Structures are given as C-alpha cells and as structure tokens.
Image (tube, rainbow, N blue to C red):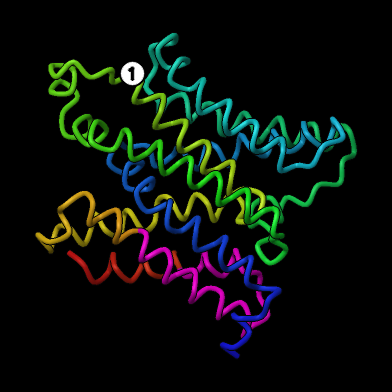
Amino acid sequence: MLFLLFDPFLANALCAAVLLACMSGPLGCITVWKGMARFGETFAHVALFGAVIAVLGGMLPSFGMAAVALVLSLLLPLLAERTRLPIDSLLGILAPGSVALALVLTQWTGLAIDFEALLFGELLTTTPRDLATIVAGITATGVLLACIWRAVLLDVLSRDLALSEGLPVRLYDLMTTAALGLFIALGVRVAGLLLINAFLVVPASCLVMLSRRSVFLRNPERMAVGAALLNIVCVLVGFVVALLADLPAGASICAVLFLVFCTMSLCVR
C-alpha cells in the first residue's frame, strides 16, 4: 500500500504537509521557548469565528480564517501593551469568546458549516494552487524568521540583555507573531486548525524533553531541525495509517503526534 503515497492525487497533499511540517519546526520552538504554546490554540478558536463571518459574507471559510489569523497576530502585541495584561490572559479571553460567538452566529443564522473540516482540514483535497500558495508563504515566512532568529534567541535567553543591546524587542515580538499568524493562515485551508496547532507545539515540546538528556540537542538550531524532522516522520506515518485504515489524513497525523508525545513523556525523564 505504500505505493499509494506516490499517486499523483496524493502528491500535492503530501508535499503540502511536509512543507508545513518543516516550517513548524523552528516556529514551534520559538512558540515553546517564549511560553506561547496557547497561541496556536487560541488562533484555532478565533479562526472559527473568522470562518463563520466569511460564510456570512459569501466567501470561502478559509479566507475568513486566514484574515483573522493575520489580523490577530498583528493586533495582539498592541492589545497587550494597551491593556497591560499578560499575553496568556488575553489568549484565555479570546479563545472561549470567539468560539461562543461562532456557535451563536451559526445557530442564529442557520448556517451549515462543517466544523470537522475546519478543525482537521481537507488535506487530501490540496490543489496545485493551494500548494503554490503554501510554497510562496513558507518562503516569505522563512525569510522573515531568518532575519529575526538571532534576536529572538537573545530575547528568549534574557529580555533585559536584549534591551541592553539596544534591540527593538517590541518590533521583534510583532514580527514573531506575524510569522506565526502567516503560518497558521497558510495551513488552515488544507491541514486544519488542530493539526497546525499540533505541528507547532508537540514536536518542539518533545525536543525540549530530549534536550534535558542530550547536550547535543541543546543547540537552538539543532532543536529546530529536530522538531522539523520529527514532524515530517509523523506526517509520513500518519499518511500511511490514513491510507491503510481509510481514515482522515489530518486526524491520523494528529493522533500520531499525540502518541509520540505520550511515548516520550513516559520514556524520557
């Protein structure tokens, strides 16, 4: 059954998933290092509200999800500065409120929205246009991340040290959230909200656990590469499981990521 992975129908889906898995390695490490693990989860909830608004406006749900992800990524640092509340507090407020509004609008207007497709994506329906968009977006995100990588690492190590070096840390915070928002906006159409969040958090968390036992993995670049490689392996295994058992590809990859994390949490101390 492995030959099915090379079927032209599945080639776009597999390439898209691998590209997203690669970029989620370094982005996921930054998310975990900066304590922003709830960032992707909150964007997933807020994006549901964006999908409902898009459908009400006669647009595709993916457009609304992408727009909300990008807008929120740019406004969140400004909102935190204005309210003087921690990012975690704002994320905790935005997540349940957005889901509640999405459900209220859905029931009120009688919309028929496939929330399962929004959560787990439609990976196997990836078109060449979707793949081209992901390639362009991943390239832009990679360039942005390369420009701010060293500054972000210094900020993670010590914000006071970064400020003493004269770095514009607020600008780098904004650029970091913009990179995360762009990545989420790219992936929601094909991979779904839950899989994108799993891509960001699970492999990076696994590498953090492994780095406690291995000096080799304590290098930030090695951790980022390791998280990307772990994501790719889980994508391939999830695809094979989905094809053999006739299961949704996105849900299968999520399940594989979860099982990998559970295994590592039991084996690594």
Q: Quadrant of residue 64?
A: top right
137 versus 165 height, above or below: below
- Residue stretch rendered in magenta on the structure: 228-256
Q: Quadrant of residue 172?
A: top left
Give residue 237's position: percent from left, percent from top. Answer: 48, 76
Q: What residue do we see at 42% from left, 57% from top?
A: 22
Q: Is residue 84 left or right of residue 103?
A: left
Give residue 190's position: percent from left, percent from top. Answer: 65, 55
Dot 1 surroundings within 10 Å: few (below 14), some, or many (20 or more)? Answer: few
Q: Amino acid at mark 1?
A: Arg
Give residue 99's position: percent from left, percent from top. Answer: 65, 36
Q: What residue do we see at 50% from left, 28% from top?
A: 73
Q: Residue furthest right?
A: 110
Q: Is residue 198 left or right of residue 239?
A: left
Q: Is residue 23 left or right of residue 93?
A: left
Say if the magenta span includes residue 269: no
Would you name the residue on which mark 1 appears?
A: 170
Q: What residue do we see at 33% from left, 71% from top?
A: 263
Give residue 160's position: percent from left, percent from top. Answer: 15, 20
Helix, strand or loop at mark 1:
helix
